[in-house]
Image (cartoon, rainbow, N blue to C red):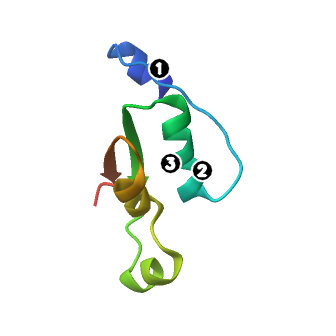
Amino acid sequence: VKDICKDHGISAETITEAGDPKETICEAVEKLKIELLVMGSHSRAALQRAFLGSVSNYCVHNAKCQVLVVKKKA
């Protein structure tokens, strides 16, 4: 991914953190002053989302930056 971004003049960084994904991602956004968060979506069934929640949905509503959610091709 970093090579693809570099080829298009986009600065990208990969980090690894431990903890609850939703909270950890939003904390990293603030700590690193991220301008755009790009996330994938698993397209889980409604029942799974109700019980497990959606990391991408949480980040869309709580991250202190723009969030782009990319869905898998059908």
- Marking on residue 3: 1
User: Picture coordinates of residue 58 (x, y %)?
Assistant: 42, 62
Q: Secondary structure at mark 1?
A: helix
Instruction: Return the disc, 1 or 3, that comes first in the chain's sequence.
Output: 1
Q: Is residue 40 above or below residue 37?
A: below
Residue beneath the point at 53% across and 30% down: 32
- Amino acid marked by disc 1: Asp
Between 60 and 41, the one nearer to me in the picture:
60
Q: Is residue 13 above or below residue 7?
A: below
- Marking on residue 26: 3
Q: Which residue is mark 2?
A: 24
Residue beneath the point at 37% across and 31% down: 35
User: Picture coordinates of residue 44 (x, y %)?
Assistant: 41, 73
- Marking on residue 14: none
- Amino acid marked by disc 2: Thr
Check if mark 2's residue and mark 3's residue have beta carbons within 8 Å: yes
Q: Is residue 52 above or below residue 9?
A: below
User: Picture coordinates of residue 7 (x, y %)?
Assistant: 37, 14
Check if mark 1's residue and mark 2's residue have beta carbons within 8 Å: no
Q: Secondary structure at mark 2?
A: helix
Residue beneath the point at 35% across and 58% down: 61
Q: Residue furthest bottom?
A: 47
Question: Could you classify mark 2 by the number of other residues whose Cα lies within 10 Å: few (under 14), some (14-19), or many (20 or more)?
Answer: few
Q: Residue furthest left?
A: 74
Comparing labels 1 and 2, the label whose residue is closer to the camera:
2
Comparing labels 1 and 3, the label whose residue is closer to the camera:
3
Q: Is residue 1 above or below residue 49?
A: above
